[in-house]
Image: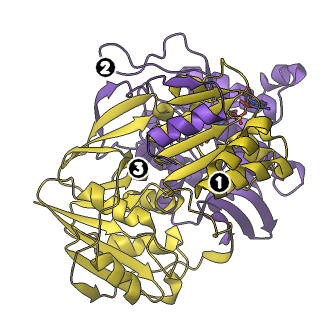
Amino acid sequence: MSKVLVIAEHDGNKLNASTAKCVACASGIPDSEIHVVIFASAGEKLAADAAGLASVDKVMYVDNSSNEHALAAVLAPQIVSLAGDYTHIFGPSTTFGKDLMPRVAALLDVNQISDVMEVIGSHSFKRPIYAGNAILTVEAPEGTAVVATVRTASYRAVGNGGAAPVEQITVSADLPQHTRFVSLQAGKSDRPDLQTASKVVSGGRALASSENFEIIFRLAEALGAGVGASRAAVDAGYVPNELQVGQTGKIIAPDLYIAIGISGAIQHLTGIKDAGTIVAINKDADAPIFDVADIGLVGDLFKIIPELEKAIRS
Amino acid sequence: MEKILVGLKRVVDYNVRVRVKSDGSGVDTDGVKMSINPFDEIALEEALRIRERGEAKEVIVVSIGTSEAQQQLRTGLAMGADRAILVESTTAVDPLTSAKMFLKLIEKENPDLVILGKQAIDNDNIQTGQMLAALWGRPQATFASELVFDGNRAKVTREVDIGLETIEIDLPAVITADLRLNEPRYVKLPDIMKAKKKPLEQISAADLAVATVNALVESAYEPPQQRQKGIMVSDVPELVAALKDKGLV
Ligand SMILES: Cc1cc2nc3c(=O)[nH]c(=O)nc-3n(C[C@H](O)[C@H](O)[C@H](O)COP(=O)(O)OP(=O)(O)OC[C@H]3O[C@@H](n4cnc5c(N)ncnc54)[C@H](O)[C@@H]3O)c2cc1C
Ligand SMILES: Nc1ncnc2c1ncn2[C@@H]1O[C@H](COP(=O)(O)O)[C@@H](O)[C@H]1O
């Protein structure tokens, strides 16, 4: 029997979809009991949301003003104090989990399994390495906690319909003062979130300016899609960093991904491997993006995109 | 600040498309171009800029790896690091063990700052910096895209999923570099010559007396599922029709 502790990700108001994806991964562990823990300044409502997730057996929340903003150095000792008899401690492979979970693992003196994409057994997992060019099977040692991050693009969020008991708990841990939150500059939230959108339209270097990038936003709006970008487009300042898709940006799995003026470097393709349908629009018929695209169209994006937007709107 | 320690991992160059060996025992790295992990180059560039602004005195580059990692350390010295330390290990070292080795060096060198890359692009682990900070009991600022120092403190802007987060940390601390922190300089030929004279200390991993515990066993490697090349359409109406076919618009 396994006992899995899932560390919830949230923004203080609602759970991030990554939490339900971690639960989905945890539920793949044979004979597992799944607990979710929420660290917040006021976590009651978040806990109620987590309790409604299918497969969850128990929800705990820890209220503390120090937990208002997720700081790894502050959260890690609290998680360690809860680790007790959990066989597994899971967090999402988002910037939240990637920052936090290795700190937890080190305090427990274990290695972390990063980016779990498949559960083979309670101590056996698959994960991508080399930007997804190889899939590695790793076996974790028995007798110590398995600390892992879950590759969210590999899992569908569990649904609702759960009714797990909720418990407010306190933890005794020394919380450091050496790390302090200052500010958060969040991107626009009036668009579908890139990580959960069912459709995503991405633009690359070919857009050539932030003014030109507007045509990508307009097409996305017509489709009800989220917007992404290649690293080249982000580096050039056409769009902010949180839109970057790829090995070092976001790994996403929308039903529809439209890559516009993006060549298809391996680092970019890593981010879209699990997309349902990939559409590529590029003026170079030999661009590597066409090797992975389900539908390809060769041509000038500045001509094609306005036409496509019109066709979709009509 | 007196000292900054920077990690330089020797990895397969980012332009190489690695392949899994046909027997599934690993990835084929024979004769493949090796380089400094790209994020570590950014980490080093940042350390050099801090020193050049007069905010630090010495930059030490550290690599844990085979003796071949001397090449990457020499490149780091040519970029401008003052000295190098190679922790020689004939086998690959996992992030927990690497973090413990870095900690041993920290105890010896007493740096004010450790800058690592956010991610080594071979195993894509994204762990070492966070683990080191935990074991050292010090702050971590991962995925950094901007650093500003103010005496014994640093303000660090971090690239997070929803945008940019700024935190303040006390020094000493561990920072991990993201792509947009800076653009690393190119190495010039005279610097390569000069780098040959800079000190490169070699320590055997065994001398650091760090035991590997709770190792993960890498039991199999396989190639990823390949996506198939699909259809080509010749104009927008055909594209829209194909999307309608799939129920996507
Ligand atoms: C360590 C590391 C990590 C990285 N991580 C990422 C990552 O996470 N995500 C990422 O995206 N990249 C990443 N990269 C960068 C990656 O290697 C590529 O450089 C980048 O993806 C290229 O972006 P691009 O396709 O927009 O630009 P380019 O490669 O320059 O491609 C532009 C494309 O636009 C086409 N084009 C030009 N004009 C038009 C037009 N008018 N109409 C139609 N098509 C046109 C061209 O034919 C070309 O194919 C990383 C690199 C490194 C070293
Ligand atoms: N063997 C090593 N030698 C030097 N630095 C390393 C080594 N392993 C990891 N690092 C540092 O830790 C960072 C993160 O690595 P990883 O946790 O493996 O993704 C790298 O970018 C390096 O800066």
Q: Where is residue A53 in the image (x, y as percent from the top left)?
A: 28, 72
Label 2 near label 3: C-beta < 8 Å? no
Q: Where is residue A101 in the image (x, y as percent from the top left)?
A: 42, 60
On screen, residue A314 versus residue A172, left or right, reads right
Chain B tint as drawn: purple
Residue of label 3: A151
Identify whether B153 is placed above or below A13.
Answer: above
| Chain appearing in yellow on the rendered image | A
Q: Where is residue B11 in the image (x, y as percent from the top left)?
A: 56, 28
Label 3 vs label 2, nearer the camera: 3
At label 2, which amino acid type do we have?
Gly
Q: In which quarter of the image is residue A230?
A: top right
Residue of label 1: A313
Kindly identify which chain the residue marked by label 2 belongs to: B
At label 3, which amino acid type do we have?
Arg
Which residue sits at x=73%, y=42%? Answer: A307
Q: Distance between the residues labelled 1 and 3?
A: 35 Å
- Label of residue B24 in the image: 2
Q: Can residue B8 be seen in this view?
A: no
Q: Can residue B136 be seen in this view?
A: yes
Label 2 near label 1: C-beta < 8 Å? no
At label 1, which amino acid type do we have?
Arg
Q: Residue furthest top?
A: B31
